[in-house]
Image: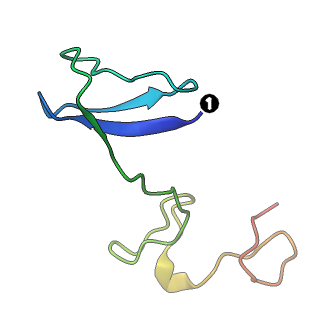
Amino acid sequence: MPIYEYVCQACQQEQEQLVRGDSISHCEACGSENLQKLLSVPATHSISSAKGISSAKGISADSGPPSGSCGSGCGCFPG
């Protein structure tokens, strides 16, 4: 069962809903059935250049890729 993101056209409340089959979704805040499906942005894992810190491991982006489990510095996940 997929989870979709919606915005209610009546009260502008954004929400995620688990959709089962052809069920009609309704707003959890006001009960309106006038919902618009939003495009979801997939989650990614990357090194942030804005603050120079990786969001996952707290590693400085200036120090290059972390040494991986293979020890070569290829960036594979540390073991």
Along the viewing direction, whichever of 39 and 60 lies nearer the viewer: 39
Relative image position of residue 65 (x, y in whole percent): 63, 81
Along the viewing direction, whichever of 74 and 59 lies nearer the viewer: 74
Relative image position of residue 37 (x, y in whole percent): 34, 43
Relative image position of residue 56 (x, y in whole percent): 55, 58
Is the N terminus in the top left, top right, bottom left or bottom right quadrant? top right
Q: Residues within 10 Å of mark 1 (few under 14, many from 20)?
A: few
Above or below — where is 24 with respect to 75?
Answer: above
Q: Is residue 22 left or right of residue 74?
A: left
Q: Quadrant of residue 6?
A: top left
Above or below — where is 48 with respect to 72?
Answer: above
Identify the amino acid type marked 1.
Answer: Met
Q: Is residue 5 left or right of residue 64?
A: left
Identity of the residue furthest to the right in this view: 70
Q: Residue at x 58, y 26 (%)?
A: 21
Along the viewing direction, whichever of 47 and 52 lies nearer the viewer: 47
Q: Residue at x 51, y 35 (%)?
A: 3
What residue is pinned by disc 1? 1
Identity of the residue furthest to the top in this view: 31
Is the C terminus in the top left, top right, bottom left or bottom right quadrant? bottom right
Q: Is residue 43 left or right of residue 65?
A: left
Relative image position of residue 57 (x, y in whole percent): 57, 59
